[in-house]
Image (cartoon, rainbow, N blue to C red):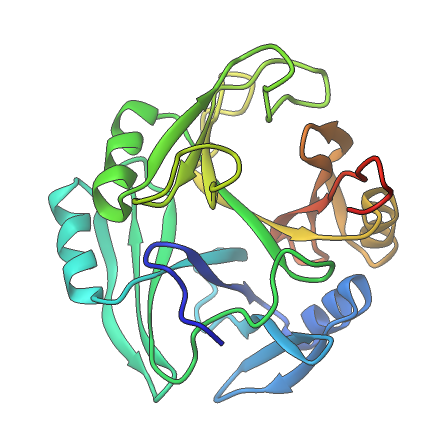
Amino acid sequence: MAAFARSAPCWVDVQLPDLEAGKRFYGELFGWTFRAGEGPYADAFSDGKLVAALAAKQDGRMPTAWGIYFATDDIAASVARIREAGGQVITEPVRAGRAGVLAQAADPGGAVFGLWQAGDREGFQKQNEPGSFCWTEVYTRQKDRVDPFYAKVFGFQGTDLEASGPDAARTGPDDSPADFRMWSPAGTEPGPDTAVGGRGVITDAFPAEMPSYFLSYFAVEDCNRAAGNAVRLGGRISAPPFDIPYGRMAVLQDDQGAVFAVLQPPVSENGAE
């Protein structure tokens, strides 16, 4: 598999109190199969291809949450840029055996993300297909600090979507306009066709104690069915299915509280997604 472009999302994992319960939930929801990794860790596969990992929390104070990792070919330089841009390094680069080197950091608004410098493991073997990762976005109250941070650290070029009109990609279930920026990698023509992630804003409609966070999306064939299945498996619906220009999405929680989104791509005029 070809290496991931620098700064592209390349991996997701989730920290859970009960690893076996997580395998049951995601195994049935997405059809994932699992292979034990080193320690309390399980690799997830879709159609035999690596798509994610589930990990048992080693410290109860850790959040039950999905984490996103961005590819880097020089993790030391990336960590230095994070500090220079006003971010915080949570975990200094550490080698994960022969798989690669990882680090964790937080942006100036407090949203946590990871870095991955590949060794034997590049990252996803499948994405943008049902049962696999397809998108990530950060939600923050401090966009004026966060936007230049991601531009400096990752080289992201922003495309601001108008708050209203047919091109507004992010509107809530009540059709309220959203302040949203798409990220395109350095060296590409900025816009929806090249975007790898984005930035949304936490508005005053949400509790003041809600922290900044990354929301990762998984592609599904049927958004409504996925939401219903999540509830049947003990999860919850945070935002019921609604339509956006890029398909139909919902925000869900698993049966242990980890939040994620699902996205059903739109059907084109010829019937293909």
Residue reaching furthest to the top: 164
In depth, the one of 219 and 157 nearer the eye is 157
Tell me where residue 72 appears, x and y as whole percent.
29, 63
Tell me where residue 205 appears, x and y as whole percent.
56, 17
Please give the name of the residue rendered at 49% of the width and 76% of the height, measured from the top-left corner. 1
Residue 43 image-quadrant placement: bottom right
Can you say whether 134 is above or below 73 in the image? above
In depth, the one of 72 and 63 nearer the eye is 72
Please give the name of the residue rendered at 47% of the width and 41% of the height, measured from the top-left corner. 195
Can you say whether 230 is above or below 101 in the image? above
Tell me where residue 140 appears, x and y as whole percent.
41, 31
23 lies left or right of 212 = right
Please give the name of the residue rendered at 37% of the width and 31% of the height, measured from the top-left corner. 158
Tell me where residue 225 appears, x and y as whole percent.
88, 48
Q: How many marks?
A: 0
In depth, the one of 229 and 137 nearer the eye is 137
Please give the name of the residue rendered at 15% of the width and 60% of the height, measured from the top-left corner. 77
Can you say whether 147 is above or below 123 in the image? above
Can you say whether 10 is above or below 273 in the image? below
